[in-house]
Image (cartoon, helix red, strand yellow):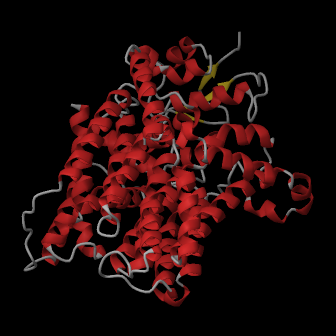
Amino acid sequence: MIVGAVEVLPRVERNIARDSKLTAAERSHAAGDRLHLDPRPFDAFAARLSPRARYRVDVPPGAQGPFITRGAVVRAYSAFYFLPAIQVTKPAPLVFHYRFR
Amino acid sequence: MRVAGLLGANALIFCIGLGLLPWLGVARSWRQLLSRCGLAYLCGLVLTGILAAHLALVHVSFGWLALVVVAAVSVASGAWRLRATERPVWTRPAWAAVAAVAALAALLVEYTRAFAVAPLNRYDAWAIWALKGHALYAFGWADPAVFAGSEYRFANLDYPLWLPSLEAVDFRAMGAFDTRLLHVQFLLFLVAALAALGTVLAGRVHALVLWPLLGAIAFAPAVFDQLLTAYADLPLALVFAVGVAAAARWLLSDERWALAVATLCFAGVLLTKNEGTLFVAAAFAGLFAAAYRRWRPLLVAAAVDVVVLLPWKLYVRRHHLSDINYSLGDSFDVQHIRGRLGVGPIAFRTLAGEMVDPRQWGLLAVVFLVLLVLAAVTGARALAVYGAATVLLSWLGLSWIYVISRFEYSSYLDSTKERVVASVVLAAAALIPLLATEAWASARGRDRPRSGAAPAA
């Protein structure tokens, strides 16, 4: 218990100090920021979506990571960020374009 | 307002669990209900998650109305079952218990400050769990457009829905997809598990063993870190640990209610992650090995768990969902296995290193190991066999997953090793007080520590 307390209590304080300063926008894009994704295209496209709207993602494959490519990461993040709109593979009226800089 | 919604939903979940306790045999009188109400919250969470997950498969949304109805039915039927039974009697609580509860409460309040501001930024948390929770909240059910959609394969679509269903219940209660307050639910899992573990072990172990164990779990850095990620591994581990402790109590005392609690917890584990099947299978293997003469109730418990898992397995089969990380069928792919057999020992050693890392888990695994040997040597063999089999089979099974996976093993191991051991370590930790008590009693040549003991096998 003492071993744990010595280790964990400073971590708790560090987390509080760091996370309590996050703005609403930073919190909303926390996952994308961690992946170094530009939040602006996501916000712009999200404004065009309605619940259950079908959309497709157009993104180059990008670099290969340990498990999936950067492009696959963008597709995954889009699926999360654009819910309750639904991502599809087949042609859709709405297309989200994302390019790596 | 959102906080009120979250806490209100959890209060109703507690009521669901409270009404369930008489049906599980945990409480046979009002007096017993009061003394064992620490189990109510976790049992309520597990049952609510199971109900919400199953209803999500048949287009039924689980929100305020369902919570109120199930809580009312549960409380009323529980009260009916306890009619004309012994009433609670006020007894002064022991000062040590009051001090321990106060210390734990202070720690949890401190944790709350961190959980209430944490961002949802870890991959699995948003890509798997929160995404599914959001989809259940938004669509009201496990809509195949998402839950079987090819574009969502990355979200481990074959993972069961217990955790996302509880997240969706929270979102409905809050009236929003709130990724910040969601973390508070994960802290509440810890509160529920500590209360449940304390109740399961109370009466079998001395308070001087019990409270330090609960403190050691609450203070374990990995518990704080991993709960804060909003991954499923720690909730899974906490529910599994309570199930393992309850099964151990049944092993030692033959109390049916303990096996009922274990069965419920194991059902929750099965419906949380696919790895849950491995852990539950390991626990049942340990129970059958240690108490083979009592195979009938064990078989019934195992059958109940299989039945609870069945609806999800049917959904998986119907929509042709498969695991993107590994396939158990690859265990028989001789070509594949031959090329990766060397991964097994590496994974086994790496996971061991994680389990005994004091900066992650304190000394929980080391103390368990010492007490396991002591219990075996002093004659408390049934518990030792059960503990050893559960932990060793889980550990071996996890190591095997790295062998059969198609991923490059070092990346896969590095990215998962810290969290996959959580269930093994916490299950081991949950057995520490019982092992210590049994070893002590056996060493002193006495019978079991309290009344109600029964032969182990």
Residue B153 in sight here: no
Residue B414, above or below B271: above
Residue B408, above or below B294: above
Residue B448 locus on image (x, y percent): 38, 78
Residue shown at the point (49%, 74%) measured from the top left: B307
Residue B358 occupies quadrant = top right
Residue shown at the point (51%, 73%) measured from the top left: B383
Residue A25 locus on image (x, y percent): 43, 14
Residue shown at the point (51%, 67%) measured from the top left: B309
Residue A37 occupies quadrant = top right
Residue B395 in sight here: yes
Residue B213 locus on image (x, y percent): 40, 52
| Residue sitting farthest toward the front | B444
Q: Is residue B158 left or right of residue B121?
A: right
Count up the numbered dots: 0
Residue B22 locus on image (x, y percent): 23, 73
Choose between A38 and A87: the one closer to the eye: A38
Q: Is residue B40 left or right of residue B161?
A: left
Choose between B388 and B127: the one closer to the eye: B388
Choose between B66 and A6: the one closer to the eye: A6
Q: Is residue B434 left or right of residue B346?
A: left
Residue shown at the point (66%, 17%) measured from the top left: A98
Quarter of the picture holding the N terminus of chain B: top left
Residue B358, above or below B369: above
| Residue sitting farthest toward the top | A101
